[in-house]
C-alpha cells in the first residue's frame, strides 16, 4: 500500500470522537475517491460546546479512537485532518482589486487578486482557516466564476474568509499532539460535512446544511455553488437529553439510552398506545410512561433548535432563496421524525443526509448522518492528496526558495472545493 495515499479524518465531537482512515483512490487529480479502511470511535469527555475544555480527557478520547481505527485498518497514521467548529468561528467577505497586466486575464492576475483579498489584517487572537474565492468582477461585469482568458482592465475578487479563535485551535492541536499525532490541517466541520452529503445541484440551487451535533448545531448556507453563510446555534442533542433527564426523572445515561431506542422528534408519528418501561429505582419502583410523553419532550426542544436555525438563515437573508431546501445531518438528525419536524418548521423540502457518494471499502460502516463530518474530512484530505500529486508531478525536484510558494498556493486556491 502506498502510504502517501493514506489519509485520516478526526472529528472530535462533544459526545463522540470519531476517526476514519482511508486510502485515496480513483482518478487523480480530478475525481479522487476514498476507500474506507478503518473507523474508530470513543466517548468524548473533554469538550464543551465544540471547544476543548479538558486537554487530558480530549487526548485520551483521540488516542482511543485513532488506535481503534488503526487496528481495524491494519495501518498506522502519523497525521490527521481535524475538524473544528463552534461559536468562535467567524466569517467575512473581503475584496481584492488589481489592474490586469496583459491584454487578457491570466492565472497570475487571479492569484494576485486573491492574495490582496486574503491579506486582510486578522486580529491577534484569531487565525485564518479558509480563504475561499466566491466570485470575480471584470471591469463592470459581476458574478463571474472563472475570469481567466477574459479581457478587461480591472479584476476584482470576492473572498470568503473564515477565521477561528487562536486558543480553541491551539488546544485542539495540543490534544492531538499529546495523543502522539500531528494535525496536518484544521478544517471547518460544516464545510467538511457539505463535501460528504451535499450534491453540486443542491449547492447551485441554494441549500442550508444543518448539522446537529451533541453540543452545538452548525449551519452552512450554499447558493450558486458557493458557501455564503456560516452560523452556530449553542444547542444540540445534549440539550434534548437533559430535558429527558428533568422531564422523566431518569439518570443522564438512561436518558441517552431511552432517547436512542424510543426517541421520536415529531409527536404525530407516535402511536398513542405505545408505552415505554422506564428503568426502575428503589424510590420509584417500576414505571411506565406513554411514548407520546417522551416524543413531546423531544419535539419541544428540537422545534426550538430548528426555530433558532430558521432565524439565523433569515437574518443572513436566505430565507426564501433555498430552492433545494434543507439537508439535516449529524448525530441528532438520525432520530425518527427529525426530517418531518424540520420540514414543518422550515416550510421547505428536507432530507436527512448520510455520506454515500464516492466512498468505497467498508463504506457501510459510515452510512449514517453522524459520520458526515469525518467522511467529509477524509474526502477533503483526498482532494489535498490529489492536488499534491498533480503539483508535485509538474514541479522540478530541486529544493529552492520558490517551493514554499507553490504549496502555499495549492493550500489556498480551493475554490473548486466548496
Image: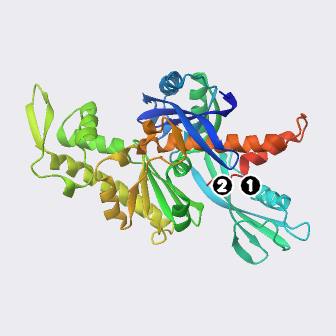
From the top left corner, tell me how far across and down residue 282 is, in percent. Answer: 10, 25
Q: Check the image and report above or below for 312 versus 365.
A: below
Q: Is residue 68 visible?
A: yes
Q: Secondary structure at mark 2?
A: strand
From the top left corner, tell me how far across and down residue 300 is, in percent. Answer: 26, 54
From the top left corner, tell me how far across and down residue 77 is, in percent. Answer: 61, 26
Quadrant of the frame with the C terminus: bottom right
Q: Crowding at label 2, few (<14), some or many (≥20) Cα neighbours within 10 Å?
A: many
Q: Which residue is mark 2?
A: 161
Mark number for residue 153? Answer: none
Count of labels in the image: 2
Q: Secondary structure at mark 1?
A: helix
Q: Is residue 125 visible?
A: no
- Given residues 406 and 366, the one toward you in this image is 366
Q: Which residue is mark 1?
A: 118
Residue at x-position 87% and y-position 69%: 104
Q: Are marks 1 and 2 in contact (CB under 8 Å)?
A: yes
Separation of disc 1 and disc 2 at Cα?
7 Å
Tell me the quarter of the picture where residue 83 sits: top right
Amino acid at each position: 500500500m502506498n502510504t502517501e495515499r493514506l489519509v485520516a479524518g478526526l472529528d472530535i465531537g462533544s459526545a463522540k470522537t470519531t476517526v476514519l482512515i482511508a486510502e485515496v483512490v480513483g482518478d487523480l487529480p480530478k475525481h479522487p475517491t476514498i476507500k474506507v479502511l478503518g473507523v474508530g470511535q470513543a466517548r468524548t469527555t473533554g469538550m464543551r460546546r465544540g471547544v476543548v475544555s479538558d486537554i487530558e480527557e480530549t487526548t485520551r478520547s483521540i488516542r482511543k479512537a485513532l488506535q481503534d481505527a488503526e487496528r481495524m485498518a491494519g495501518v498506522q497514521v502519523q497525521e490527521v485532518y481535524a475538524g473544528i467548529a463552534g461559536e468562535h468561528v467567524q466569517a467575512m467577505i473581503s475584496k481584492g482589486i488589481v489592474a490586469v497586466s496583459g491584454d487578457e486575464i491570466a492565472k497570475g492576475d487571479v492569484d494576485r487578486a486573491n492574495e490582496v483579498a486574503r491579506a486582510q489584517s486578522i486580529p491577534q487572537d484569531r487565525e485564518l482557516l479558509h480563504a475561499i474565492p466566491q466570485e470575480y468582477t471584470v471591469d463592470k461585469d459581476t458574478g463571474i466564476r472563472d475570469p481567466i482568458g477574459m479581457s478587461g482592465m480591472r479584476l476584482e475578487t470576492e473572498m470568503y474568509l473564515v477565521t477561528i479563535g487562536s486558543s480553541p485551535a491551539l488546544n485542539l492541536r495540543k490534544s492531538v499532539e499529546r495523543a502522539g499525532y500531528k494535525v496536518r490541517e484544521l478544517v471547518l466541520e460544516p464545510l467538511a460535512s457539505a463535501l460528504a452529503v451535499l450534491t453540486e445541484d443542491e449547492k447551485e440551487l441554494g441549500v442550508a446544511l444543518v448539522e446537529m451535533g451533541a453540543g452545538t448545531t452548525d449551519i452552512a448556507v450554499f447558493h450558486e455553488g458557493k458557501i455564503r453563510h456560516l452560523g452556530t446555534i449553542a444547542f444540540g442533542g445534549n440539550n434534548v437529553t437533559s430535558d429527558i433527564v428533568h422531564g422523566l426523572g431518569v439518570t443522564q445515561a438512561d436518558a441517552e439510552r431511552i432517547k436512542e431506542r424510543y426517541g421520536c422528534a415529531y409527536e404525530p408519528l407516535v402511536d398513542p398506545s405505545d408505552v415505554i418501561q422506564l428503568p426502575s429505582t428503589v424510590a420509584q419502583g417500576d414505571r411506565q410512561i406513554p411514548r407520546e410523553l417522551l416524543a413531546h419532550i423531544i419535539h419541544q426542544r428540537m422545534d426550538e433548535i430548528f426555530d433558532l436555525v430558521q432565524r439565523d438563515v433569515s437574518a443572513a437573508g436566505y430565507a426564501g432563496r433555498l430552492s433545494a431546501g434543507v439537508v439535516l445531518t449529524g448525530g441528532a438528525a438520525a432520530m425518527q421524525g427529525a426530517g418531518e419536524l424540520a420540514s414543518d418548521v422550515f416550510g421547505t423540502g428536507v432530507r436527512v443526509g448520510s455520506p454515500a457518494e464516492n466512498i468505497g471499502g467498508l463504506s457501510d460502516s459510515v452510512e449514517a448522518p453522524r459520520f458526515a463530518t469525518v467522511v467529509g474530512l477524509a474526502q477533503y484530505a483526498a482532494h489535498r492528496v490529489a492536488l499534491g500529486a498533480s503539483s508535485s508531478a509538474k514541479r522540478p525536484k530541486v529544493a529552492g526558495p520558490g517551493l514554499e510558494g507553490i504549496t502555499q498556493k495549492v493550500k489556498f486556491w480551493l475554490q473548486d472545493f466548496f
